[in-house]
Amino acid sequence: MTGTVVIELLKDSAADEGEEAIQDKLGLTVKGLDKELADQLQLKETTGVVVTDLKSDGAAQEAGIAEGDIIKEINGSAIQTLKDYEKAVAAHKKGEIIRFLLKRGDSSLYLAARLD
């Protein structure tokens, strides 16, 4: 599956009626990853949140976070659900640095973003 197809599936999925997706103060729009979405995107992961969109001038994009990334941890705290993600981001104030553990394809990577 090509990157363009994955991104289109993510955007279609985020737009589905009744599906919860949130945009936060980092400039990220994320959606909780479940088995159905993982199957659709041909992912082995079934927990975490998946980045469905980025604000073009947001802190997340400047940090290198990309559409399709799966957020697994924030500052060492496991992110398994959308609620975990919301709680972790809300715990930080403007100007603080947030460290993400991401799954991108077959790789895991750490990135940091300063909260706007």
Image (cartoon, helix red, strand yellow):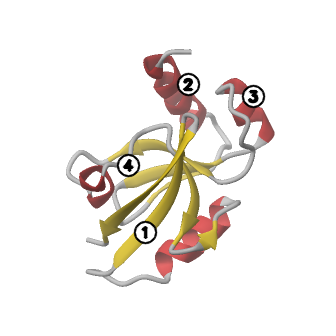
Where is residue 83? Give x, y as percent: 66, 67
Identify the residue at horizontal 38%, vertical 49% (top origin): 65
In the structure shown, which secondary structural element does the residue marked by tag 1 occupy? strand
What element does badge 4 sit on?
A: loop
Above or below — where is 4 with respect to 79?
A: above
Residue 9's tag is 2
Name the amino acid, label 4.
Ile
Q: Are marks 2 and 1 in contact (CB under 8 Å)?
A: no
Q: Nearer the viewer, mark 1 or mark 3?
A: 1
Mark before the other along the chain sequence, 4 or 3:
3
Which residue is tagged 1? Answer: 99
Give the Cα separation between the discs numbered 3 and 2.
Answer: 11 Å
Q: Amino acid at mark 1?
A: Arg
Give the percent coordinates (x, y) of residue 25: 36, 66
Q: In the visual, does 25 lie left or right of 75?
A: left
- Mark 4 to mark 3 CA distance (whole Å): 22 Å
Q: Which residue is mark 3?
A: 39
Cα gap from disc 1 to disc 3, whole angstroms: 27 Å
